Amino acid sequence: MNAGTLVTPARLCGTIALIVIGLAVAALHAVAGSDGFGVLTSRAGPDVHQILVHYSWLPRLTVSLIGGAGLALAGVLMQQTLRNPLASPTTLGVATGAQVALLAATLFAPWLLGYGRSAIAFVGGALAVALVFALAWRRGLAPTVLVLAGLVVNLYLGAVSLALILLNQEKLHGLMIWGAGSLAQDNWADVIDLAPRLAITGIGAVVLARALALLDLDELNARNLGVSLAWLRLASLGLGVFITASIVSDLGVIGFIGLAAPAVVRLAGARTLGARLLWAPVFGALLLAATDLLLQLISGSNAALIPTGATTAALGAPLLLWLVPRLSAARSAPRPTAPPPIPRRAAPWRLIGGGMLALAGMIIVALFAGRGLHGWNAPFALPWSETGVWRAPRVLAAGAAGALLALAGTIIQRVSGNPMASPEVLGVSAGTGMGLLALIWFVPGASTPALLGAGTAGALATLVVLIAINARSRFEPEQLLLTGIAVMFAFDAIQRIVLAGNDPRTQSMLAWVSGSTYFVTMHTAVLITAVGAVLVALAWPLGRWLDVLPLGESVSRALGLHVTISRLALLALVAVLTAAATLIVGPLSFVGLLAPHLARLSGLARARTQMAGAMVFGALLMIAADWVGREILFPVELPAGLVATLIGGSYFMWRLRRI
């Protein structure tokens, strides 16, 4: 599209407005019956339909328009300030930071809520943005690195939110719906609260518009024209965080409106900042209203439980996937020189043997040591019938899953040549999760082989998406990571939609998503371990491929290796490995990233020694995470996958800070 085509921002918004009007008429009739307009305009004594229309339906429609406009305006301000077309309240972690702050205040310092939820949400969003900037600062806030940092912070804070919800399910059950972005209303309070805040943000944006337009120039010219870039960016980002925090505190997390609206109006011809400041809020308001009205019509009497925010995120993830290849690489800062290679260990198998002894010790601790009714029990203090029988399946399953994820991570890092790659970060685990969720939801009581097949299909589909989007860029590392994390966001949105419902299957799904081994049976643990042993046996002879592929395509071909076939075979193996592990510990643990790094940093440079070392470290990490999660807050448990996520996510952010 360009400005000369028939599609213009005005015509686009006009078309969406007509759709919204049609949906609103249909939704009004669904709420108030055939005489919807009569109920809307009647001044007679109140009846049930009038109450529903005037105190639920109309406030909901109004707040959706305000929320969409505010998020779109925040997106324009962030994109212009950072000169980054992928910046938005969602991709920079503002919304998730605000959510975590509100959850923490509700649980641990409810007196803070007396100062206003918006203030708490603002602090949380601002701290999240500060963390994103800290992670991306060394690369000069390069667009891809900045957005990658924002998405990683989002995922990490999402894990923190999930941990808080799991530990306080009775207190926070209703907040699952809020966290998914429910627009349900029973009065006009949110409209009265948000309308003036949107007006303040709009006035501030207009005041800053002339100075912000100068950011299209380079920084030197902007300074020569008298612009204080530091204060301008602080004021602009402050406005964006302010309106986002206000919306999150009242409506919950609403995903991707702030990304979609500015991008779409730009494609429709809104090239100047003034045009985007006008049309993006209009389009964002209409887009959120249309989505919410459509969901009301689909859900009928369950409209109050619709997670509109999560639905917009699910729709926005494909948009992010489409935008990622179009992010100009010319704006990225130059890549720093590679760090010196790590010296190879002279006796690698001695180190691996030491790791196996540590793993055996951790298994003994996990089986026999822990807290009970009378405090801590030393190893072997209690008989096997009281401890080992119910702990053994968990230890076996956690160890097998950790080893399989570590092996998958080693393979995918060597195949892609990207040290930041892993099944979790590239979205393969999330794709597995989508396949598993679909089968669990539509086929209750599915067998373990069926779950494994569904997970493998989801992982393979994700790999196809990754290859299709990144083949043209020759799998440039930062773009590959962005693609994978966009897939993870799509899964996160679907997960929020599922968890917001009141279905009895939600509890077991919540436990699986968070990586709990609580429900693992010995049959499942033995089956996954057997499958894992077969997969390891298949992977071991491919060690030569993994030694050769990192040398590059030309060298690999010269050594007689068919690059395409070998890569496809290895990626298919990664899909099955990830599916088997994700079935046990959920879709996000970061063990597939952390264990291969620990092996490489220990001097295990050759493919087979790194594979063996990573599997030992991965099993050790997952068994330790399961034991720590089981004992640290006894009798309350933290799932093993969640503990591993908090550890591995911290490591990922540290690594991102150094690239």
Image (cartoon, grey):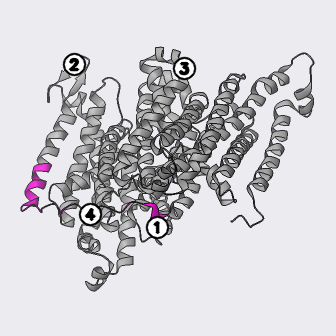
**The disc label shown at residue 116, or none:** 3
Whole-percent x, y for residue 527 in the image: 34, 51
The residue under label 4 is 337
Secondary structure beneath disc 2? strand
Distance Cα–Cα, label 1 vs label 4: 23 Å
Magenta stretch, main secondary structure class: loop
Magenta extent: 328-355
- In front: mark 1 or mark 4? 4
Secondary structure beneath disc 1? helix
Q: Are marks 1 and 3 in contact (CB under 8 Å)?
A: no
Magenta stretch holds residue 325 = no
Whole-percent x, y for residue 613 in the image: 19, 56
Kind of residue sitting beneath label 1:
Asn
**The disc label shown at residue 470, or none:** 1
Magenta stretch holds residue 347 = yes
Kind of residue sitting beneath label 3:
Gly
**The disc label shown at residue 604, or none:** none
